[in-house]
Amino acid sequence: MDNNTKRFLIETVTWIGIYFGIAFLVSRLLAFPYSLIVIVLAVIGLGVYRRRRYFRKAGQAASSGSSYFGNMFGSQRNVNYYCLNCGTKHDQTSCPNCGSKLKKAGF
């Protein structure tokens, strides 16, 4: 295992422990219907906290329109198309070399 994998596993196990610890403490301190509501709110709150922390580490603001799926607004990445028939790189509907319309996208 490399260092990134170890760090990821340690961080994941730590967060699972935090979630279970909070759930255990809240379930011991509050009665059933209230504890369930507090636990759900705590899980949602920790999820928001983790997401903001992730984007801060990545150097992006969580409110700038970016998400786990990429940037939804602003600059777009250039997409290159490659002909599946002859492999020519192009940005047109059909291949300028062989005329085929079969293509794959690449970055």
Image: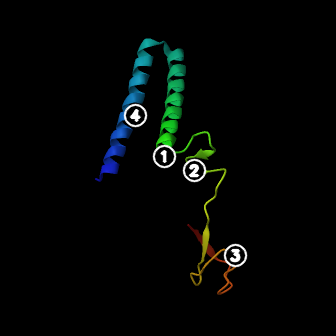
Q: Report the side of 5 relative to 100 (left or right).
A: left
How far apart in space, not on screen, are marks 2 and 3 (Cα)?
Answer: 26 Å
Looking at marks 3 and 4 on the same chain, the residue that comes earlier in the sequence is marked by 4
Q: Nearer the viewer, mark 2 or mark 1?
A: 1
The answer to whether the residue labelled 3 contacts the one labelled 4, judged by CB atoms less than 8 Å apart, is no
Residue 48, relative to residue 30: is it above or below? Answer: below
How far apart in space, not on screen, are marks 1 and 3 (Cα)?
Answer: 34 Å
Residue 46, relative to residue 35: is it above or below? Answer: below
Residue at x 40% of width, y 18% of height? 25
List the residue tagged with mark 3. 92
Q: Horizontal and vertical percent for residue 11?
A: 36, 39
Label 2: element kind: loop
Looking at marks 2 and 1 on the same chain, the residue that comes earlier in the sequence is marked by 1
Residue at x 69% of width, y 85% of height? 99
Query: Looking at numbered disc 4 in the image, what kind of residue is underneath it?
Result: Trp
List the residue tagged with mark 2. 69
Looking at marks 1 and 3 on the same chain, the residue that comes earlier in the sequence is marked by 1
Which mark is on residue 40?
A: none
In-front residue for pair 14/107: 107
Residue 60, relative to residue 95: is it above or below? Answer: above
Residue at x 66% of width, y 74% of height? 91
